[in-house]
Amino acid sequence: MKMPAPFAGHHQQLEGDMEEVHGIVIVGGGICGLATALALHRKGIPSLVLEKSETLRTDGGSIGVHVNGWRVLEQLGIAAELRETADIVTEFHDVWQQENKSVVVPVRDELRWLKRKDLIETMAKNIPSGAIRLSCHIAAIDPTGPENHGAVLTTLNGSIIRAKALIGCDGSNSVVAKYLGLSPARSKPRMFLRGFTRYPHGHPFGPHFLRLRGKGFFVGRSPMTDNLVSFFVAFWHPDEDAAKDARAMKDFVLGKLQAGQCSDEVVEMVRDPEPESLVVLTKVRYRPPWQVMFSSFRRGTATVAGDAMHIMGSYIGQGGSAALEDALVLARSLSRAASAAGSGSGGGELCEKTISAAMGQYVRERRLRVVRLSLESYAMGMLLATKSLLVKLACSAIVALLGTHSLGHTNFDCGRL
Ligand SMILES: Cc1cc2nc3c(=O)[nH]c(=O)nc-3n(C[C@H](O)[C@H](O)[C@H](O)COP(=O)(O)OP(=O)(O)OC[C@H]3O[C@@H](n4cnc5c(N)ncnc54)[C@H](O)[C@@H]3O)c2cc1C
């Protein structure tokens, strides 16, 4: 497919200085940035991913991907390969320890717990070599002119990259979101310990995901394969001393689980995780739903996707799948614009207008979906942590109305690429 000028990955090193010109530039090579680059590539549109780390960040343990995320992975052409790496989860076992109550809820459609490493590496290897640039930290972004058609990116070492279209997939502390004028993401103190544990002789948990609510804590445990189990432990009211380092945090968590009379199986799982899988977080970052509703997510030919757009607490486990949905919808909008520009009059200026219209279409298409997810995540977070009866009632009403417990939000199909 021959691409019209604004997308053609023409890349020009201007003589005598450190300045390059590119078509579509994606800042951030996490789940969203790679998914966007891959989706664009599948549509024959080149892009350049700029990632500040020296390697693609494959740390972070595991990620639960529900049916909405799998639909996107299908469209990206990598679902079959990824399914080989992770077993399906068929039931939730919900346990309220203090109330001595438990229920079994069937999982709606497909849920599998992937290693982040597998997801990131599978996307990366399907993107043309040279389209991902590592150790490229974008420090500042400036507009190119009054109409914001394009952006000028300055790297930490002073190089200049001109982008005709800019997509910020740079996570919670996004430099692109700042350029768009978005408020910084908010944060609340919470403690999360997550990782995965290997059972060389097989684990006994079957295809069941445990959701255990204890006094002030929550344990999630999901099988990944016959030998591998993913877990997280969350505390709503963190202990400041424990949050100082990973070892103190793990001791604190184990102490609490033992004091909370968690079963030996749970304690042992947390005691012996794969060292590289362990992630410790002391804050939950989020963009409140009203910000997601009313923020302007586009400036000229620049926009944001994934956590940069709508970071949410991990209470409903949808941040990653929502980022995949963003990637698909954005690539589809740009590809439709490319086709229209290819068959239309197509001057440079018109094409840049077309890019900004495509980005506007993407933002409109995503807005209500990401508001809903942000609202559900926000309400779940408040519900678990608040001591106010009134707030509890309001959040319970939202969660009941939106069907959060029955995973209504996973039943979403953002369509074909
Ligand atoms: C504890 C926890 C559990 C979670 N569990 C789940 C789950 O089970 N299911 C689920 O769907 N989601 C889950 N999520 C959410 C999910 O991890 C995120 O929503 C997802 O990773 C967002 O991807 P992203 O690419 O938008 O951002 P990120 O993964 O943050 O990637 C951003 C990338 O941009 C790079 N970058 C940042 N700034 C710059 C810069 N200036 N220049 C160049 N590069 C830059 C970073 O190095 C990084 O690689 C969880 C999140 C947390 C914290």
Image: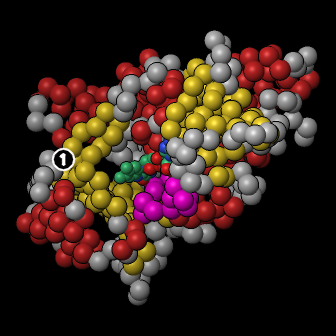
- Image quarter in which the C terminus is found: top right
Vertical order, 216 against 364 (above or below) = below
Between 147 and 209, the one nearer to me in the picture? 147
- Image quarter in which the N terminus is found: top right
Confirm whether residue 31 shows in the render. no
Q: In the image, is 250 to the left or to the right of 132?
A: left
Q: Residues within 10 Å of mark 1 (few under 14, many from 20)?
A: many
- Residue at image position (22%, 47%) is 190
**Residue 153: image location, x then y, percent:** 60, 34
Between 229 and 189, the one nearer to me in the picture? 189
**Residue 324: image location, x then y, percent:** 58, 44
Between 110 and 218, the one nearer to me in the picture? 218
Instruction: Name the residue tied to disc 1.
Output: 236
Q: Range of the magenta residues? A: 53-72
Between 327 and 133, the one nearer to me in the picture? 133
**Residue 23: image location, x then y, percent:** 75, 35
Q: Amino acid at mark 1?
A: Trp
**Residue 409: image location, x then y, percent:** 46, 38
- Residue at image position (44%, 17%) is 294
Vertical order, 71 against 398 (above or below) = below
Q: In the image, is 222 to the left or to the right of 131?
A: left
- Residue at image position (21%, 69%) is 247
Farthest left residue in view: 259
Q: In the image, is 364 to the left or to the right of 80?
A: left
Vertical order, 229 against 25 (above or below) = below
Farthest front residue in view: 16
Whether the magenta-drawn stretch holds residue 57 is answered as: yes
Find residue 207 and report its image quarter.
bottom left
